[in-house]
Amino acid sequence: MKAVSIFVVVIIFFSLSGLVFGDDDEPLLIPGTGDSQFLLHTLADVFNGTGAGFRVIIPNSIGSTGGIRSLLAGDISLARTARPLNDKERGMGGVEFQFANSPVAVVTNPSVKEIDNLTSAQFADIYAGRYRRWSELGGRTQKFIP
């Protein structure tokens, strides 16, 4: 079963003149989620080889919320996040732009033989606590192991 997590780039405008990227010598850091980090490193490497006048750096993950907090604090110009902004973050000036979807594979333990077709909604319900045992989804009477 595949669930799709939304990969969003968050953009905030720091002044009336537009985005602040810093000096040409200063790289553009885009911290945040670890989702699709390998792909983004690859894209940054390709971009950095174009001679565009500045470099893009994709640092190791600090999580979606960490990236958004840094963005809203004015420490960075762009952040990467695997979730939409909440109302509070939008109210603080955050703007999101979805540019890609990141596939996520869900794998069960081999002991869960009866379950082979979980839907995205069922998977979300497991994490929301609406299901407590595999038997509620057609499997054996055993609890989910976190």
Image: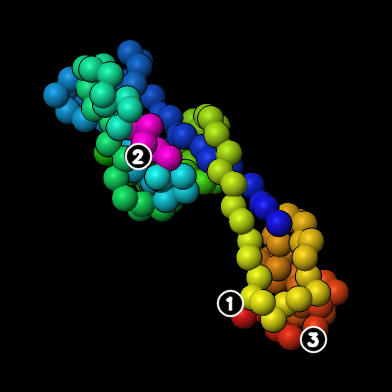
Residue topped by disc 2: 41
Q: Any mark on residue 114, and which?
A: none
The quarter of the displayed image where residue 67 is located? top left
- Residue 63: x and y in percent read 41, 53
Residue type, mark 2 in image: His
Quote the CA–CA distance across marks 2 and 1: 30 Å
- Residue 72: x and y in percent read 37, 39
Residue topped by disc 1: 146
Q: Quadrant of the N terminus?
A: bottom right
Dominant secondary structure of the residues highlighted in magenta in the image: helix
- Residue 44: x and y in percent read 33, 32
- Whether residue 133 is situated above or below residue 28 in the rendered picture: below
Residue type, mark 3 in image: Thr
Q: Any mark on residue 141, and which?
A: 3
Of labels 2 and 1, earlier in sequence is 2
In the image, the segment drawn in magenta is 39-44
Of labels 3 and 1, earlier in sequence is 3
Quote the CA–CA distance across marks 3 and 1: 16 Å
Crowd class of label 3 (few under 14; some 14 to 19; many from 20; radius 10 Å): few
Q: Between label 2 and label 1, give the one nearer the viewer.
A: 2
Residue at the image position 33 percent from the left and 13 percent from the top:
17
In reply to whether residue 107 is colored magenta, the answer given is no
Q: According to the image, what is the colour scheme of the structure?
A: rainbow
